[in-house]
Amino acid sequence: MAKQGRAEEGMPRLEQQLCFAIYQVGHAFNRAYRSILSGLGLTYPQYLVMLVLWEQDGLMVKELGERLMLDSGTLTPLLKRLEASGLIRRERDPRDERQVRIHLAEKGEGLREEGRCVEQAIGEALGGTAGDAARLRDHLDLVRDALLASSREG
Amino acid sequence: MAKQGRAEEGMPRLEQQLCFAIYQVGHAFNRAYRSILSGLGLTYPQYLVMLVLWEQDGLMVKELGERLMLDSGTLTPLLKRLEASGLIRRERDPRDERQVRIHLAEKGEGLREEGRCVEQAIGEALGGTAGDAARLRDHLDLVRDALLASSREG
DNA sequence: GACTATCTAATTGTGCACAATATAAATAGC
DNA sequence: GCTATTTATATTGTGCACAATTAGATAGTC
């Protein structure tokens, strides 16, 4: 079928674009985590929240959002679901009632051990493909920061 | 401040995880495209669909889904919105009435030229950070394929 | 004390993503 | 010709993501 790279007048093919590679690998990660995390009753963003809380308990919604780069419109309903499943408690700070502080509940604390297996399972799914994962990650962080800086300017 | 890598008993910090880097750079791309594409009245997934159609018109929903790795539950409402904004037409194949074929409308064809500027704008936003973008992309494709293969097995 | 600016979180509305299910058409086997 | 299976799309329900708006609380000013 001839060479596939029929780049029509400077419009790069979808498969050649970095953004699309990231879009797809993001979906692939999501699916991989989904099948692993379904056993814990968590989605991937919920797991990220738990990871942060296992590292540091008692954060405010604002602080969680800064760590995860998510706003309250995303976090509020997500946190309510985590509270409904008994993993966390949402408590208004009595000193400043605007703020909601998030604490691990016993059930969420207990999930910590099961959580340790998750990264191992993902590591196996990655096989050797991540290669020098640290360098790949650092490169992606550079790309992220350039994009965010540009979004803020423009 | 000490060394930041206080990896508590084998639980890697969020910032160290490849999945999180990809999660964040995906969001960053989304935001960068959002500010560029809002002028065209497109979202990023809608733009991806248009990219595919500019490359090859008259695809069926199934084929679009294969190219983008999206299912009909995602594409059907997205395509209806593109049809509502006059960029495409959805036509049932008269020979096999299960299938819906997607064609560019004139308005969608006319957007092709404006679309050419998008990748240039993203390139500027990336600055030099993409570096050897092709190799980065190839690496990400490997990661994606390993994850997908593992998802299918498990 | 009332007034205003600021800050935090919740709420609302739109759109993406996907699992599960439904519907309907084409095809295979008989 | 008739049923069974497969295939293509649509529908429904849940959850993430974010912009825009709202509401409550604090702090500072007069």
Image: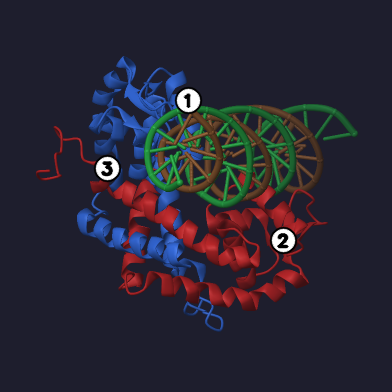
Chain colours: A red, B blue, C green, D brown
Q: Foreground: A146 or B23?
A: B23
Residue B39, quarter of the rendered image: top left
Amino acid type, mark 1? Arg
Q: Residue B2, percent across and down?
A: 49, 80
Q: Which tag, 2 or 3, sits closer to the chain's start?
A: 3
Foreground: disc 2 or disc 3: 3
Instruction: Work out whether A15 lies above or below C11.
Output: below
Output the chain of dot 1.
Answer: B
Let me know if marks 2 and 3 both belong to one chain: yes
Answer with left or right where residue B93 lies relative to residue B120. right
Q: Are marks 2 and 3 in contact (CB under 8 Å)?
A: no
Q: Are marks 1 and 2 in contact (CB under 8 Å)?
A: no
Let me know if marks 1 and 3 both belong to one chain: no
Q: Residue at x 40, y 60 (%)?
A: B148
Image quarter in which the N terminus of chain A is found = top left
Amino acid type, mark 2? Ile
Q: Secondary structure at mark 3?
A: helix
Q: Residues within 10 Å of mark 3 (few under 14, many from 20)?
A: some
Q: Secondary structure at mark 2?
A: strand
Amino acid type, mark 3? Leu
Image quarter in which the C terminus of chain A is found = top left
Output the chain of dot 3.
Answer: A
| Residue at mark 2 | A102
Answer with left or right where residue B6 lies relative to residue C1. left
Q: Residues within 10 Å of mark 2 (few under 14, many from 20)?
A: many
| Residue at mark 1 | B81
Output the chain of dot 2.
Answer: A
| Residue at mark 3 | A14
The CA distance from mark 2 to mark 3 is 42 Å
Q: Residue A151, percent across and down?
A: 40, 41
